[in-house]
Image (cartoon, coloured by chain):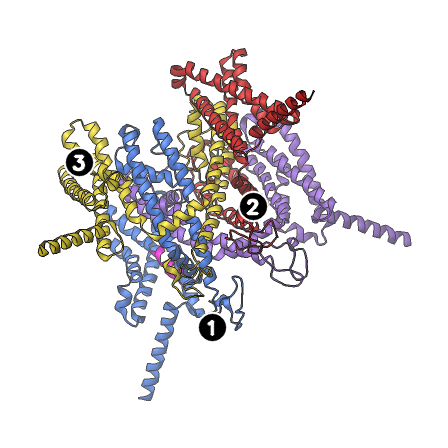
Chain colours: A red, B purple, C blue, D yellow
Amino acid sequence: MNKQRTLDKQHLTRKEKWREIIFDANTPDARLFDVLLLWFILISVFVVMLSSVPTVYDNYGKLLTTIEWVFTIVFSVEYFLRIYLSKKPSNYIFSFWGIIDLLSTIPTYLSILIAGPQYLLTIRTLRLLRVFRIMRLTSYSREARALGKALRASGAKVTVFFGFILIIVIIMGTIMFIIEGPKNGFTSIPRGIYWAIVTVTTVGYGDITPNTILGQVLSSTLMILGYAVITVPTGIVSVEYADQKRKRNICEHCGTENENDAKFCKECGSDLSSS
Amino acid sequence: MNKQRTLDKQHLTRKEKWREIIFDANTPDARLFDVLLLWFILISVFVVMLSSVPTVYDNYGKLLTTIEWVFTIVFSVEYFLRIYLSKKPSNYIFSFWGIIDLLSTIPTYLSILIAGPQYLLTIRTLRLLRVFRIMRLTSYSREARALGKALRASGAKVTVFFGFILIIVIIMGTIMFIIEGPKNGFTSIPRGIYWAIVTVTTVGYGDITPNTILGQVLSSTLMILGYAVITVPTGIVSVEYADQKRKRNICEHCGTENENDAKFCKECGSDLSSS
Amino acid sequence: MNKQRTLDKQHLTRKEKWREIIFDANTPDARLFDVLLLWFILISVFVVMLSSVPTVYDNYGKLLTTIEWVFTIVFSVEYFLRIYLSKKPSNYIFSFWGIIDLLSTIPTYLSILIAGPQYLLTIRTLRLLRVFRIMRLTSYSREARALGKALRASGAKVTVFFGFILIIVIIMGTIMFIIEGPKNGFTSIPRGIYWAIVTVTTVGYGDITPNTILGQVLSSTLMILGYAVITVPTGIVSVEYADQKRKRNICEHCGTENENDAKFCKECGSDLSSS
Amino acid sequence: MNKQRTLDKQHLTRKEKWREIIFDANTPDARLFDVLLLWFILISVFVVMLSSVPTVYDNYGKLLTTIEWVFTIVFSVEYFLRIYLSKKPSNYIFSFWGIIDLLSTIPTYLSILIAGPQYLLTIRTLRLLRVFRIMRLTSYSREARALGKALRASGAKVTVFFGFILIIVIIMGTIMFIIEGPKNGFTSIPRGIYWAIVTVTTVGYGDITPNTILGQVLSSTLMILGYAVITVPTGIVSVEYADQKRKRNICEHCGTENENDAKFCKECGSDLSSS
């Protein structure tokens, strides 16, 4: 009986240890697992990308399929391991990451069942959802969190700003639809708005361009607007990020506000860089 | 007599209540009205946009016209309600928003009277002026006001800057007109200036491109200029916005200047975030 | 004799008054003169631009020529007035602005003497040099000076930065010339560099585009580089402009350094906004 | 014997003096050498670039080859001088700069040995590696080092950011490959990613453009994303550069932290601008 309990405990600790490796990011083993997983994801994404190139697939199709199967089995094992190790499996399965994990693994299995090549293409590309998994791995990082905070801080103002851009784009797209008309490529208001977005963001494909004098004058205005107004959200994000950074320098230990570039709290000497 | 007065008062308070709902933005009812109106505007704008797509109009023209009539009636009721509820109706009617409201509502009525389809198109698109109304709804917001302040603060300097860009663009457009000439698409100075704007704003449609060596050298200079100089207004707006934000942290209650990131006044404890 | 002296003095003061009006910018009369001159320049520039549009010139050539002659006579009078009023005429004549004034006025006179239409075109467009004169009028402004200061402050660093961009562009242009070769439009290294500048500045005309896989990988790198590195000079200019602005808040009267947003010196009460 | 020693010493000091001239950058002679070398590099790079233009090479090929030989001999002399003057020649030879120096000098010699014109082209263009040498000359500068520091400071955050852009680009490229398909130019996922990079960086060549409605809606989103998100790294670099600049104002002599715009240390009076 005592032996049984020890075994149980050992079993438990082994499971806990694996849980730590897979779900945490702070122990050396967990880090190694994350780095390994990152490489697996990157290579498998690269393989999926290569498979989509006709000339590559015609020549190396068999090799790529084999590699894909290896990765699929690895990711399947990881998926079931995550379910097994979760304290509450359903939490993981129905979480955003759980669904991503499933959707990016099953396509290879489905490719046996489904015959039509056109469906296969769409299903196979689902495997590229794995790139989202990179985000999970990096979302642990302090930098990503700091960025997220700064973005949330400037969010409301930047949203107002892009709402304004959207209104401009709708109005300009409509005006250009009336001025230039279908014969110059502005076949509908949505297409005019597409052109206005291409122009205001300074992308400028050149697939639709103004041909009338008035159209060129108006689009010049829109270009200068797009070129100029980007300064506004840039300013907002800069200032909010500066504030965010300064706020982070309040010592977590004693609450003293330190200089922007202080490394240790001037009151209690705590390491500020850890916060 | 007393009854009459009470009725009058009741009638007055009901009118006042409606006025509050429609013209204000701070009571729960007024907010609900604004949100409802915003959705009505957005959907009606979407319907107008869809109507301009030939394939959609050919198939769903009748449905879209019906929806449009429903919205037109709703907006008409709202328009007359605004006139009726205004303390001085003429103020509203001849205000910028009043004219927008009228112009974006009457096209549907006009479409019965006017037969020619080409005029109809222009008149129907007038309904898209409704997007301006979104601006009114959002102009209440604190974010929009803060942005407006920052822009006004950097206005004079940014204007000087864009005046400089304009001079560069006129000179470069003229030089390219002389160098490249009509056979390379630079048919006139205004067209050269249009090209220069397309280039300096980094839009780069590619509808007019330099073909001579000298023209390519000059346009390279213009591109680098356009790429480089945008840093200047960005810097200006950033700094002015930072100053604007800092200024806003002067306590409205006691006038004490607080730290940039303070939430409450250090002298009197007032909530600074409300200002 | 006394009368003669008074007349002399009166004559002198009239000359001085005119000098003040034309060369200064601070008295009401001088301001009026500047604004008038600005409008004359703007309209005459607009006329020159219109004259270059073939369809406009064919229809309104005579009218435009008449207007041009009126402006030319006005600018000629102004030119001789400037020479006459200068304390040392040769200083004005051989200054940058003096040469601009001359070069932008004589083309109309030359057009009588020269017959060949192709030379005429180049000479006539010389009149557009008048836009430079707008710069003189605006160079008085405090905003333009503040901008100039900030640019000079960040100059050295931004130059280093654009030197780096130049090196990247030369190397990438050369590599692409080797990879893509003349058959894909990269006919020489200078043309490769032209393409690299079009790409790194995010202009992207699309007149030369990479067609090989390797070329597309490399140009993707160049695009991301161009998209990313503009953040660096923007940061530099922002910070230098902020410093420049703060420096300007040192009271000119007593030398005390004031808060960034102070309007009056905290020591002596002088108005800081005038500096 | 005594004479011999003096000669030895003199010889040594001459060698040391030359070493100083060539490897240092602080004495007037060393500066002169650097400026001279910079001009030699610039002119020789210009000559290589000109040689690649077919029409120029056909007409001035002989002249350009002669000039190239002069430069090659000068750079060869410099190369051997550097080896001779190095305290440990192997250190120089196998350093990055040593390899660049060698690789950019030998092509001219190889051009005698190798006959095939297509190899010659590639080898000849190797000489353009000389532009890297400009970097060495400028890397001494304080501005370049300050920039480098600011970039390293913002490195981690900006990397996270561009990792995010990369994921977006992979996902959007894949989605567009599925939506638009090979008939609209999206022949493979890598090509879709190339398009996504062209779009998100606002380059917009227009060699591949979306043709379906859904494709245009998605690419509009990508454009706005690319237009908007550049504000984030700009903000980061601005703030980090500001911090970097402030840090530099710690007096090197006594360690006192001075005001951002102080020119002399407030404690010991040392010149802060020299640091």
User: What residue is shown with label 1?
Assistant: C253
Which is in the foreground here, disc 3 or disc 1?
3
Res D108 label = 3
Q: Quadrant of residue B129?
A: top right
Q: Is residue C138 magenta?
A: yes
Res B194 label = none
Name the dominant secondary structure of the magenta segment: helix
Q: Position of residue A89 (x, y in %)?
A: 65, 24
Question: Identity of the amino acid at label 2?
Answer: Ser
Q: Is residue B50 magenta?
A: no
Q: CA distance from mark 2 to mark 3?
A: 58 Å
User: What residue is shown with label 2?
Assistant: A275
How busy is the neighbourhood of tag 1: few (under 14 within 10 Å), some, or many (20 plus)? some
Viewer-side residue, A247 vs B188: A247
Which is in the foreground here, disc 1 or disc 2?
2
Respond whether the residues carrying marks 3 and 1 are from the same subunit: no
How busy is the neighbourhood of tag 3: few (under 14 within 10 Å), some, or many (20 plus)? many
Instruction: Judge from the rendering whether residue B26 lies leftward or rightward of residue A190; answer left or right.
Output: right
Q: Which residues are magenta?
A: C130-140
Q: Position of residue B266 (x, y in %)?
A: 64, 60
Instruction: Judge from the rendering whether residue C70 lies leftward or rightward of residue B7; answer left or right.
Output: left
The chain letter for the residue carrying disc 1 is: C
Question: Identity of the amino acid at label 1?
Answer: His
The chain letter for the residue carrying disc 3 is: D
Which residue corresponds to the image point at 61% horizontal and 23% vertical from the top-left? A83
Question: Identity of the amino acid at label 3?
Answer: Thr
Viewer-side residue, A135 vs B53: A135
